Image (cartoon, rainbow, N blue to C red):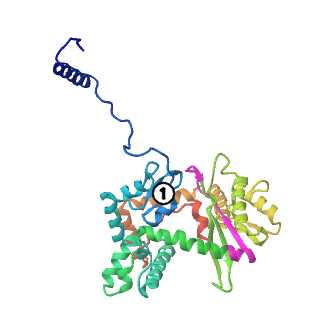
Amino acid sequence: MVKRIRTDAADISMEYANSDSETDREVPAQKSRRKYDGAVKCRVKYKPSWAKDYPVKAVLNDCYSFFCIPRGKSVSCQHQALRNVKVHCELDTHRKKLEAGKKSHSIRGFLSKPGNSGSDVIKAEVMVTTFLVQHNLPIATADHLGPLFKEISPDSKIAAEYASGRTKTSAILNVALGPHCHKYLVEHCNSHPFSLGIDGSNDTGLNKMNPVTIRIFDINRSKMVTSHFFDMCVNSGVDGGKAATIFDVMDEKFTKDGIPWLNAISLSVDNTNAMIGCNNSIASHCKAKNQSIFIRGCPCHLAHLAATAANISFTEAICVNVEDVLINLYYWFDKSSKHKGKLAEYFEFCDQEYHQVCNLSLAFLGTLY
């Protein structure tokens, strides 16, 4: 500010006014750093009483926020408490979500069918699932059955409401039928004798599967000997193929279901050392649990061993390998229509029906008996 001596009071007052305006332009006013003007910044916790008037609920790990149910998001309430809830609920996005939620249908309508046909539809879906399993059909077939039923019976209420594709069919099989059948098997084995059968999968993956089947006789239900799948007994690791590891998984499943080993009367396995050997095998571990259990090797493997030994002796006697003859005979007719035509003429000459030549070797000869 320039100092000047003025005798006129008006000039002095005008000079001070100009000086103040210049100072205001040079030093701008500082803006407030507070995010919420006009209110005190404090930390307010969520109160459950707010849920009576607004569609909100508490946040599990944050007591200074509330969860907006229609929008599905967490909003802070630590600044103005209930006013934060009111302001949020007055937003257009919140109102649109709230109106859309009122128009949406409950999931109960998709799970239960109105009227008396609901149970009939569920029965039909379960029966179709059982049909697919009994005939070893792909689960993907269920995607085509629903539209097929509607085309075949357009006037049927059950066909119109039938809605079981591959996803629902898998759920019926694994969540409903599977546990029900397993429960029946466990209850029967707890009080009745049964026989076991186990075999191992090839070591082609990270996990090794050892499916266990159980054969039972229920005089009150099937009145005949039936086979049931018990468990896959999956294991992995370096020792996954050892007998001790496989038996530990079996024993764990039996202990979990409370099935006593004393009720196991027989064990059916193949003739490898890991299965039927005298020391440290599946059979020896089962013998340790139940001394009375009967161990039976696979008869097909035994027949295969007998056929192999007979082929070796027969080859030495006649100097002809029978297995090589069978293999050469198959490939002689397999890729030639001309040779098959000659074979058909021979069948006609012998007054016999034509039969295709199969690829048969002595390795599978035992399975025919």
Disc 1 crowd, CA 10 A, few/some/many (<14, 14-19, 20+): few
Q: Could you say which is closer to the camera, residue 107 or residue 42?
A: 42
| Residue 207 in the image: above or below residue 287 | above
Q: Quadrant of the N terminus?
A: top left
Res. 20 image quadrant: top left
Q: Quadrant of residue 148?
A: bottom left
Q: Is residue 3 above or below residue 115?
A: above
Residue matched to label 1:
328
Q: Is residue 276 visible?
A: yes
Q: Amino acid at mark 1?
A: Asn
Q: Please state the horizontal and vertical placement of residue 212, each as a whole percent of the image.
A: 65, 65
Write the residue at 77% across / 53% down: 280
Q: Secondary structure at mark 1?
A: helix
Q: In the picture, residue 323 is in which quadrant?
A: bottom right
The spot of residue 215 in percent (x, y) is: 67, 74
| Nearer to me, 178 or 346 | 178
Residue name at image x 35 percent, y 70 percent: 102
Residue 218 location (% of width, % of height):
68, 82
Residue 12 located within the stretch drawn in magenta? no
Depth check, front residue: 309 or 258: 258
> Is 204 colored magenta in this rendering?
yes
- The magenta span reads 186-207
Quick check: 261 left or right of 111?
right
